[in-house]
Amino acid sequence: MRRLFGMALLAVTATCGPTARAADTEYDPAKVSESLKAIFQFGSVATKQALNANTVTLISGTIGGTYVQFGADLASVLDDGNKLRVLPIVGRGSVQSVADILFLQGVDLGIVRADTLDYLERKGFAKDIKKQFTYVTKLYNEEMYVIASKSVRSLSDLNGKKVSVDLPNGGTFVTAAIVFERLGIKPSFLYLEQRIAMEKMRAGEIDAVVAVGGKPYKSVAAFKDDRFHLVPVDYSKPLQNDYLPASLTAKDYPNLIAEGESVDTIAVPAVLAAYNWAPNTERYRKLAQFVDAFFTKFPTFQNPPFHPKWKEVSLSAPLPDWQRLPVAEQWLKSRNIEAVTRAKFDDFLKQSPATAATVKTGADKEALFKQFQAWEAERNARAQVRPAAR
């Protein structure tokens, strides 16, 4: 009997022992996961209010584009439990993002191209639209890519040809429309998603594909076919009011540019924009919370593993004809972070008589000023932004 009792006790110990030890070492997931805390507390009014009050929604761009990567980077760095959450949403492009910021409930911010709002006004689609927007910061310059057969040596060779300019909700279609119109070139536009367009070009069904995005732009970098190359886009006078000169090299796109060569193109600024909310509103409060976190942690974005284009971003870079979000302007001024001013540019010309001699007209000066702004912004972008001492 005693032996049977001993065997039974051993069996019970063998069964319960591991469970007891597991209980001693088991961790509480809710201690490390804010999401689990929210689920465990489901139904709590306080939890629901905190999640909604501190979440900022950002419309980014299409899959494979630079906007999506920037949105992911912002969420990665700025998410801070329930204190602040950045919720990036895959968008449909710059034109749709403008509409989403204006009309879609719950959208606080979006990444758009600087030329999109101008285009909407010039074509009569919107009136005084810039007054409805503010910008947090100019982000980076997006290069224009024109991929075509090597027999196409210039944009004028595409006159009357079939050219895909991405979907009509995006900024690429807008930039392409402006550029070709100003240069007096009239291709036949097709509105195709870029991956589909590139396959049709391989098959000889279309003549060129236009893309606009910050380098390295994935869909362009991934395209490989020895029959095609990048067509130069000259920085001619009709383009100088709204665009900046840019250059692409074999290092950027080895599949499309020969080693040691470069291709001239133009670039258009990408903008982190928001609706022009009144300062005393709840939506403005959330933007203020985002700005403080973003600007304070800004140096983090300029290091790996984040997108290389962050290195071009200068928080203080001005954006002509746009109004900056007041709380962003105040943040920069309180830390003595100044934009590139006309006075700085005039001083530069005085100290560079050879450069000043090339300025013949007001348009020449304006174009040179934009180039100076871009150069100064890129130079300053590498400087780390530090919060003021408290």
Image (cartoon, helix red, strand yellow):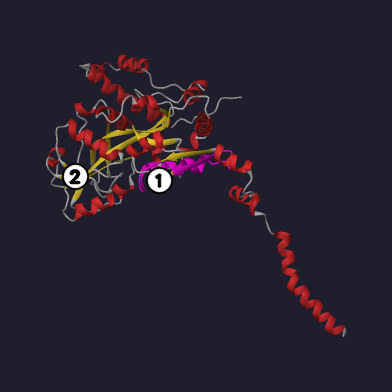
Q: Vertical placement of 208 versus 13: above or below?
A: above
At x 20%, y 47%, the residue is 229
Q: Residue at x 67, y 54 (%)?
A: 28
Q: Quadrant of residue 350?
A: top left
Residue 118: image x %, image y %?
Answer: 29, 28
Compared with 342, 105 (above or below) is: below
Q: Secondary structure at mark 2?
A: strand
Q: Callout 2: few (<14), some (14-19), or many (20+) C-alpha neighbours within 10 Å?
A: many
The numbered dot on residue 379 is none
Q: Residues within 10 Å of mark 1 (few under 14, many from 20)?
A: some
Q: Quadrant of residue 289?
A: top right
Provide residue 224's location: percent of width, then percent of height.
Answer: 25, 53
Q: CA distance from mark 1 to mark 2?
A: 25 Å
In the rendered image, the quadrant that contains the N terminus is bottom right
**Residue 164, how many percent across, how many down?**
22, 45
* Residue 226, x across and y down, in percent: 20, 53
Asked if one can make out residue 243 in the rendered structure from this viewpoint, the answer is: no
Q: Say if residue 373 shows up in the picture.
A: yes
Amino acid on which disc 1 is placed: Val
Q: Secondary structure at mark 1?
A: loop
Residue beneath disc 1: 90
| Residue 263 lies in the magenta stretch | no
- Whether 79 is among the magenta residues is yes
Viewer-nearest of discs 1 and 2 = 1
Q: Look at mark 2 in the image and give the residue it sits on.
A: 163
Q: Is residue 143 above or below residue 118?
A: below
**Residue type at tag 2:** Val
Q: Nearer the viewer, residue 71 or 347?
A: 71
The magenta segment is 60-88
Q: Residue at x 62, y 47 (%)?
A: 43
Sequence-wise, the earlier of marks 1 and 2 is: 1
